[in-house]
Image (cartoon, grey):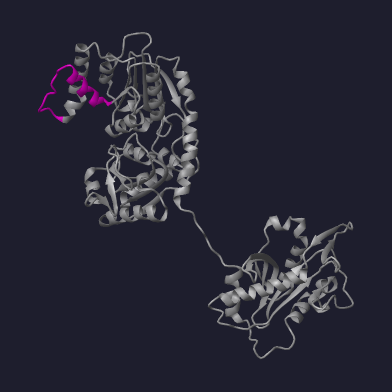
């Protein structure tokens, strides 16, 4: 059996009635020629005319033999007619209908010469002179008793009788005859050159950047579809909005704050994390909304009330108890500072006794609004986060992940327990995992960032490198650069071509198209959940064997 390119015909060729004659010839060549022959089916080519214009064509079959040479074959099914007065060729189907076709002899001859020219351009060909012939197979036509023209001797045609009876003999005859002293065998090397010319495998991959842009387009569209929930909130003065990471809590909270301010309401936006507050303030630039972290709010109110912040206290005592007490006391002293609408994001991080101080800043009128957005992950934050007990908050669930790709959602969901969340985003790429020795982590991270920027064409500002603590960050950075790229922390906007390098906890509530997660040590389930869900489209994990193996085992066990 001949060695065929392609090895098997695809279904779209087999089922195409216009290709039926070519399919018959393919099957006949494959079964009748021995394994010393190589047959290429449907090989297109691009050539040039004498004046430099491009011409393209296709050779139905190229039959090659290491000793006999190369044969270019054109196939035409049905009956064939030629009108020399009009220089037109026709095929005639079983119903007697005539169809315009190209001159099959000229097609085969042109393909032969174009292929020879391209072979001569290959450095491995080395100016060889081989036997190259052309022919036409007409599998439905009865044989002609004479030549069909000066350039169309009877022998170059394989009519129905020979096609059915002795196709291999016709091929050998076309490649036979007396040879010139210049001709040399095609040889195995010639076969390899032909295969490289006519059946060269290749893979052209896209960079990551176009995929990121397409993912972002879909994700942004999906996020705006979530805005219908805000219309529902218009009739609810107080509500608790729950959802997992990626369900759009922060985007909804920001948009609700904007809408409240647009109708003239004194509006306060409060969250826990400072970098998130910085990002929200930037989104609300030009909008009359006060944006604060909870502890920033406490400090601002204390200053407005002329109260001093005690010194010498532990950080835990200061942030958990003293700051909230200052907020409550300063609210009592400054009755003139009240808000018509308070929007709280990251509500799961607020302690139960903080809510009374926040509620004290709300205008005591029926038209005031309090909306609390919180993460519904019971595995990390408990079954019910501490929410205002006396605020009559109506619970609303966000059940669609709009920010992350399906692949990243599946990874983060291994660390989630709560009501079901549907991944609505694009499929995206699977996360990458790299295990390296501890001493190689800085170099591995720098190499990955370089690959993303130089080869994947990702803008540095679209990359966030997240680490478990500041000491790991310090190991990665030298002269305020990670590798060749300047860095900044979350919330501190860098110049163009700078990338974010920060701790997972500080990046909570934020997102990035690409996240490189560095895990030289074990992560808590909360940090793992936060870190994985920060990536919108692409996630790379680089770390030592123990932490990486543990994370992967949790993910695999949840599938």
The magenta-colored residue range is 292-314
Placement of 146 over or under 320, stated as above or below: below
Residue drawn at (57%, 67%), measured in percent from left and top?
200
In which image quadrant can residue 48 be found? bottom right
The one nearer the camera, 226 or 389, is 226
Picture coordinates of residue 240, whole percent (x, y)? 39, 21
Specify the farthest residue to the front: 51
Side of 263 relative to 67 (left or right)? left
Q: Is residue 363 visible?
A: yes
Q: Quadrant of the N terminus?
A: bottom right
Residue at 29% across / 37% down in the picture?
491
Residue 104 vs residue 355, the one in the foreground: 104
- Residue 141 lies, in percent from the top left, at 86, 68
534 left or right of 56 in image = left
Q: How many marks?
A: 0
Above or below, 410 against 417 in this view is below
* Residue 427 x %, y %: 50, 43
User: Residue farthest to the bottom?
Assistant: 181
Q: Quadrant of residue 113?
A: bottom right
Is residue 180 placed above or below 492 in the rendered structure? below
Query: Magenta stretch: residue 185 in it?
Result: no
For residue 37, say whether it is visible.
Answer: no
Q: Is residue 474 left or right of residue 259?
A: left
Q: Is residue 294 magenta?
A: yes
Looking at the image, which is closer to me, 41 or 485? 485
Q: Position of residue 527 (x, y in %)?
A: 32, 39
- Which residue ends up furthest to the top in the rendered image? 365
């Amino acid at each position: 059996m001949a060695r065929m390119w392609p090895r098997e015909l695809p279904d779209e060729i087999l089922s195409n009635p216009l290709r039926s004659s070519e399919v018959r010839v393919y099957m006949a060549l494959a079964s009748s020629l021995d394994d010393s022959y190589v047959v290429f089916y449907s090989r297109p080519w691009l050539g040039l005319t004498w004046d430099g214009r491009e011409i393209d064509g296709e050779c139905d079959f190229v039959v090659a033999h290491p000793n006999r040479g190369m044969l270019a074959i054109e196939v035409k099914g049905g009956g064939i007619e030629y009108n020399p007065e009009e220089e037109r060729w026709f095929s005639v189907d079983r119903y007697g209908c005539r169809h315009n076709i190209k001159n099959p002899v000229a097609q085969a001859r042109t393909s032969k010469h174009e292929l020879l020219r391209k072979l001569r351009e290959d450095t491995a060909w080395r100016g060889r002179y081989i036997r190259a012939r052309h022919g036409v197979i007409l599998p439905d036509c009865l044989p002609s008793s004479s030549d069909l023209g000066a350039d169309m001797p009877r022998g170059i045609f394989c009519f129905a009788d020979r096609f059915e009876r002795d196709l291999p003999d016709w091929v050998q005859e076309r490649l036979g005859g007396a040879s010139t002293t210049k001709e040399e065998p095609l040889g195995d090397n010639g076969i390899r050159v032909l295969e490289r010319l006519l059946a060269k495998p290749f893979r052209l991959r896209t960079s990551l950047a176009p995929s990121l842009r397409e993912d972002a387009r879909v994700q942004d569209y999906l996020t705006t579809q979530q805005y219908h929930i805000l219309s529902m909130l218009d009739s609810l003065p107080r509500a608790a909005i729950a959802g997992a990471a990626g369900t759009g809590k922060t985007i909804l909270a920001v948009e609700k704050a904007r809408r409240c301010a647009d109708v003239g309401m004194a509006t306060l936006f409060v969250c826990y994390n400072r970098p998130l507050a910085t990002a929200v303030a930037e989104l609300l630039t030009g909008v009359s909304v006060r944006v604060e972290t909870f502890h920033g709010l406490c400090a601002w109110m204390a200053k407005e009330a002329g109260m001093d912040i005690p010194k010498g206290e532990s950080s835990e005592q200061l942030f958990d108890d003293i700051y909230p007490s200052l907020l409550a006391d300063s609210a009592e002293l400054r009755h003139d500072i009240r808000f018509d609408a308070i929007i709280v994001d990251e509500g799961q991080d607020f302690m139960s006794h903080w809510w009374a101080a926040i509620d004290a800043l709300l205008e005591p009128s029926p038209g005031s609004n309090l909306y609390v957005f919180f993460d519904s992950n019971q595995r990390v934050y408990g079954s019910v986060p501490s929410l205002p007990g006396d605020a009559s908050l109506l619970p609303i669930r966000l059940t669609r992940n709009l920010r992350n790709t399906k692949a990243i959602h599946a990874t983060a969901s291994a660390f989630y327990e709560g009501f079901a969340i549907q991944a609505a985003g694009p499929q995206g790429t699977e996360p990458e995992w790299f295990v390296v020795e501890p001493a190689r982590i800085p170099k591995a991270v720098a190499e990955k960032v370089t690959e993303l920027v130089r080869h994947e064409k990702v803008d540095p500002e679209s990359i966030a490198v997240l680490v478990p603590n500041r000491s790991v960050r310090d190991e990665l950075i030298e002269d305020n650069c990670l590798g060749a790229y300047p860095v900044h922390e979350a919330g501190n906007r860098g110049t163009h071509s700078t990338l974010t390098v920060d701790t997972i906890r500080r990046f909570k509530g934020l997102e990035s198209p690409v996240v490189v997660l560095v895990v030289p040590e074990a992560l808590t389930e909360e940090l793992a959940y936060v870190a994985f869900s920060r990536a919108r489209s692409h996630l790379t994990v680089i770390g030592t064997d123990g932490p990486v193996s543990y994370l992967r085992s949790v993910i695999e066990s949840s599938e």
